[in-house]
Amino acid sequence: MMIVNDQNQRTRRLVILCIVCFVLQLALAPFLALGGGHVNFCLICAFVAAFMGGGSDPLWVAFISGIFYDLTSTTPVGLMALLLLLAAFVMNTADRDRLVDEPVRCLRDGAVMVLAVELVYQLAVLVVSPGAPLLDVLFLRWLPASLLDWICLVPFVLVLSRTKSDALTLGGSAKKSFPGKRYKL
C-alpha cells in the first residue's frame, strides 16, 4: 500500500473551512451573543486549521482569519491576528492531522486556547478603551464569548474528525488492526 500526502486536498479543505467560517462570521456571529460576548468564527477557523497540521499553512490561515476579524469589528487592527497567529503556532506542533487522530484532545486544547485568547483579547481591548469595569469585562464578555466559541468549535472538530481522506488509501482497503492483540511468530 502506498501512502500519498495529497497537498491539494489539504489546501481545498483549508479554503472551504475559511469560506464557511468567514461567511458565518459575517452572517451569523453578530446575532449569536450571550451577555456581551459574541462568537468568533475566525478563531474557530484558525484553531481547526492548526489542528489539521501541515507546516506553515495553518499559520497563514490564522493570520488571515485574525485580519478578517479585525477588519469586520471595531477593535484595533492586528490584535486578533497576532493572538490567533501565536495560538496557531503553539497548537501546530506536528505535521499530521490531529483532528483525525485525537479529536478529544483537540477539543481540550481548543478549550484552553479559547479561554487564553479571549482573555488576552478582552484585557487588551479594556486597556485600549477603558471605561468598562473589569468584572463586566470578565463575566459579561470573556466567559460568555469563550463559552460560545467553544460550543461552536465542537461541531467543526467532530465533523472534520470524521472526514478521513480516501486518497490516503488510493481506493484500497486498509487492514484493520486490533490494539489489544499481539501476534507472536
Image (spheres, rainbow, N blue to C red):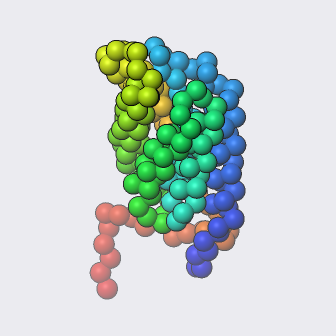
Quarter holding the C terminus is: bottom left
Q: Is residue 72 above or below residue 156?
A: above
Q: Position of residue 112 (x, y in %)?
A: 35, 40
Q: Is residue 138 above or below residue 24?
A: above
Quarter holding the N terminus is: bottom right
Residue 149, visible in the rendered structure: yes
Left or right position of 159 against 12: left
Question: Total of numbered circles in the picture?
Answer: 0
Residue 7 lies in what quarter of the image? Answer: bottom right
Q: Position of residue 73 (x, y in %)?
A: 60, 29
Residue sticking out furthest to the bottom: 185
Residue 48, visible in the rendered structure: no
Left or right position of 58 against 117: right
Residue ID at (53%, 56%): 59
Q: Position of residue 72 (x, y in %)?
A: 64, 31
Residue ID at (61%, 18%): 31
Residue ID at (54%, 56%): 58
Q: Position of residue 70 (x, y in %)?
A: 58, 36
Residue ID at (58%, 60%): 57
Q: Is residue 2 above or below residue 158?
A: below
